[in-house]
Image (cartoon, coloured by chain):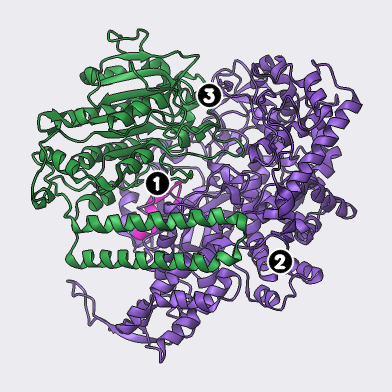
Amino acid sequence: MAALLFLGPLDLMASDAKQNRFGPAVLDLIDQSCIGCHDKDTDTNLNFESVSSDLSNRSVFKTWERIFDRVSRGEMPPSTETPPTEASRDAALAILKDQLNRVSLRIQARDGRVSLRRLTPLEFENSLHDLLAIRSDLKKHLPPENSNTSYDTVANGQGISMVHVRSYLAAAEEAIDEAIELRESPYRQPVKIDYRNSPYVKMWLDRPLRNGGSTLKMVGDDFVTFEKRCHQARSDHMGFRPQYAGMYRITAEAYGYNAKTPVTMNIYRSSEEDGIAKLVGYFDLLPGATRKIQFTTYLRTNDYFYPSIADDDWGTQSYGIYTSKDGAKTYDGEGLGIKWLKIQGPLEQQWPPKRTRRVMAGAQIKPMPLAPRPWRPFTFGRSEPRIGFTIAEPENPQAQLTSIIKELGKPLFGRPLTKPEVDGFASLATEAIASGEAFENVIRSPLRALFTAPQFLFRTCQPGQLDDYALASRLSYFLWKSIPDQQLLRLAKDQRLSDPQELKRQVDRMLNDRKAERFVNDFLDQWLNLAEIDATKPDDKLYPEYDDNLRQSMLRETRLFFRELIVHDLSVRNLIDSDFTMLNRRLGVHYEIGGLSDERFHRVNLPAASVRGGLITQASILKVTANGTVTSPVRRGNYVLAKLLGTPPSPPPPDIGSIEPDTRGATTIRQILNQHRNVQACASCHKHIDPPGFALESFDPIGGFRIRYRSSGKGDFTHRRIHGRTAWEYREGPPVDASGNLPDGRSFADVRQFKHHLMSQVPQVARNLVAQLVIYSTGAEIQFADRQRIDEIVDACKDSDYGVRSLLHAVVQSDLFRNK
Amino acid sequence: MNTSIDRRHLLKAASVSVALPWLESTAAVTSASEGPPPRTVFICTALGLHGPALYPKTPGTRYESTEYLDLLKPHRDDFTLFSGLSHPDQGGEHLTLMTFLSAARNPGLDGFQNSISIDMYAAEQLGYATRFPSIALSTDGPLSQSYTSSGVMVPAEHSPARLFAKMFLKGSPQEIAKQKRQLEEGRSILDQLRTQARLLEGKISKSDRARMDEYLSAIRTTELDLSESRKWMDKPKPSTDTEPPKDIYDRSDLVGRTQLLMNMVPLILQSDSSRIVSIVIQDHHLVPQVDGVSVEHHNLSHHGQEPDKIAQLKKIEKHLLGCFGDLIGNMKRKSEGDASLLESTAILFGSNLGNANAHDPRNLPIFLAGGGYDHGKYVAFDKDDNTPLSNLFVNLLNRMDINADRFATSSGRLDW
């Protein structure tokens, strides 16, 4: 509390910036070097005549922080202005730094770094999934996060409104519905998807190509398809449509039919209602061999699935099966042959399933005869008696309810519940108990309140060091995106988690757990914008080789690559450039790297001359930094500065026009850009932004290496082969120029040299990664006072050459992580 | 709650095809009929409208028709076309979709916070005078342009069948009893959540109290909403002789899905289920089922000046404009007493992008139809120095008897 007394007005200076309360040094600098442009007539966002210096105001603070940064980085004043003397500049910066630091520290001491943070939709869903052993999509009920902060975990960007409250109630209801499964036991033995005897398949076999048939055939007992999206093979048409949502195991024996090259078997899942086909599994089939495949996937009630072919060569046909004269009968391209296909599920050891036992916390489940199914014509024999389930009336319903609330509440709240809390939730069932409701109904209201309670939705703590329970929650929402497990809660109870050795042990344990995958995926989705992978879809004339398999493979490369850095504590320098990457066959083809046999990923050593290695030359990154038709050096340059180096350039002045794409092959993006790079106002930022983008011009919007732009209009025919035939969809347009000059004068001829230059930035990349991890894990943006502590973390990891796992440990051990 | 307003326009509505049985239960009509209530419909097609095919050269009433305007010829006197309108300080490529109805500045920039959208603002002012204060519809799942004052998106309804059921289907006595029970349950849960939040008070720091208050106020609004819904439950739903719509699951049937949503508009308004409707039309990554179109809609919008892509893009946009034309026609045909439904309804149809090829958020294509305005004009504002679109919003609010002299970035009221 003492700190509070000293706070007073944080604004120590007068309200007008001209009479600057930062003192004469800052005022001199502004007068000499800034005010010429940044006065009331400015076209920029900054006007020194009106900017306040009340640093307690968040946006004013940000403005001065930005001024400090741009001047200290030498970006401002621009070279056209009289440069300040080094001494006057340093004096001004020193005062600014001191003031900013002081105010920042005071606010932190008073309020903590982090405001009251709410769970993200992903964290909400994972928590209930883990708690109840359920799987259904709860996120779909929740409103999307505002996209105004770097991560959705950041408290200051999170709204809470009636929309949220209603959505949480709806999601909780669905979770409870799924958890309390008392219907009769489903048939859980393997079911054969029988194409051989299907009248539906037969219909398509006989139908002519122009009516949508003849794209499949039967070869002996084998089903052969040539379709990219083989709706004719939908499982529901063969009699399989899940009655129960759950995990299902799909097994098959398949081969490439008439195949001289590998073909891919895709399994899509869809439903009539959502109308979107999701690729849930894919398997490469090598020529000359059949392959047994097996995988598990989650199916919703009334979903269907179907196999399809990908990566097939089209033989002599230019459009695949569709231009073959008699369809499948005479088609000479590659097909997908299926010897048999089976599905089994829902995969539950016992019935009612685990989730029901868990939510009842020991209450006894007993069978209950159900009313027989209504009689329908053409059903033969006697109908079997149907047996459902119910919860045996507990001896003491109140006590049973209390124990359910305590047991389920503890992981959700990250601590034991207090008695008033338990009583409060239990009170919602008073009437139901009194009126003798079935116990499965008694618990519904209390659970719904528990799953939407503020103690669950918000991470509460007091300024200062986190207690062990709060630490356990912060840790588990960081690395598992979910509730803490029993072990963490036990350590918290014994107050052992805050012991640095124990904390390190736990971080290691958590990183080795499968659930850590959620951290890798979610962190990269947001840090590197991988969540935007589908924001644009590549033009299928310009990039005909892009498909679902390539899309999934590129995402996996980046995720596995980052995971590899964590697992083996490899240096962040690998983010800039590395001598290995993670590849499967499909991605190998895309990168023109051979030696990979199928869809499974391997760590591959890159040839010395490879343009690959590091993050920014991975296809996923190149994809999310482009749109569907063209690349923009500005966008990619901005990405490298902001995401990899953590030095985002200033936003463009308001209402500046953007570049109008022209893909007719006459002008290149560089020619268009050069025009505005010559304007001084643009050049001061663009000399930083454009060079990384220029280097990455060697890669097209789907991350393929290129020496010429693809053109939909003018240009030469290409020799590239797609689907075993020469690509005719596009032309080879103007040549790519991937050379450039860095602001420090060094020049590069191509992306390899560029990455080589970038290697001098290894500590900066480490600093940025630490900052990103701190923001993401704590839920607060980096504040001025945090900078020094981040530098300390980075310095401490110098000995491990900034190993990623070491950095993770150092972040968790730091004050930034362990305080509010 | 101003019930007299309800009664007076209901008198008018009772004669149309959507019968309003609850009128009969209203004991006495106190005031003389003053005509139907004002309504507003906002429709946004998210990928712009190709300018060269849309805009005439001559402003005023004697503008020459264009490729696109040809499609709206029968309604020439029922709409005004604007150019040179936009929201100031926009950017962030497609993020302007979020701000089309809110006009919040700088979407996509650090620290951006959306603000209340005009439909939600109007709905707040009108309150629970109708069963639904506002209705947001979308061809793209829950994506809407409706935002609360704290910048949270209000999810849209994308199933016309479900909306129809909510508006008209009465449900069995058991179902109604169950719904009431669920509402009651919801209310006691909310009550308990408030109690739990109080228990938490000692555990949160002073600086976090404001956020906890935000949570408590969200609980309060939800309670209010539930209790208003509860009141509406006791009022019989209006009936209609219209067949319930069948949802189209095939997402590539963009035109069909759009048409279905448009068809809901007269039903919503005539039954007085709501007076504020917003519709988002978007399907970035699908090839819409339109003859002669083989490329995804979004990629077509980035046509890069390729003639073939522009031709395909125009085909899609013509269909969407066709849906708009049909809506105007429909609304004209439905009469409410002496006037048509269109007379009482202002329809804003436009896009959040002026030129989608370059993500340009300036010079938005904006149509205004109906609402009793003097139409038949092409109004061209300065294309280099745009007029805030919010000025038009102010006008629309005033027309709904909402006393506002500004909205978001408005600089005044738009008059033309």
Which stretch is magenta?
A: A225-236
Q: Secondary structure at mark 3?
A: helix
**Relative image position of residue B340 (x, y in whole percent):** 15, 29
Report x, y in % for residue B287.
41, 36
- Left or right: B104 as drawn, with respect to A21: left
Quadrant where the C terminus of chain B lies? top left
Q: Give the residue pinned by disc 2.
A: A512
Q: In the image, is residue A803 above or below residue A341?
A: above
Chain of the residue that carries numbered disc 1 in the rendered image: B
The hue of chain B in the figure is green
Compared with residue A56, is residue A484 higher up or lower down, i.e. above or below? below
* Residue A295 shows in this picture: no
Which mark identifies residue A819?
A: none
Q: CA distance from mark 2 to mark 3?
A: 46 Å
Q: Identify which amino acid the numbered label 3 is placed on.
A: Ala
Secondary structure of residue under mark 1? loop
- Is A159 a magenta residue? no
Give the image location of residue B159, x and y in percent.
31, 48
Assess disc 2: are there few (<14), some (14-19) or many (≥20) residues with their C-alpha within 10 Å of its C-alpha: few
For disc 2, the chain is A
Identify the disc placed on residue B358.
Answer: 3
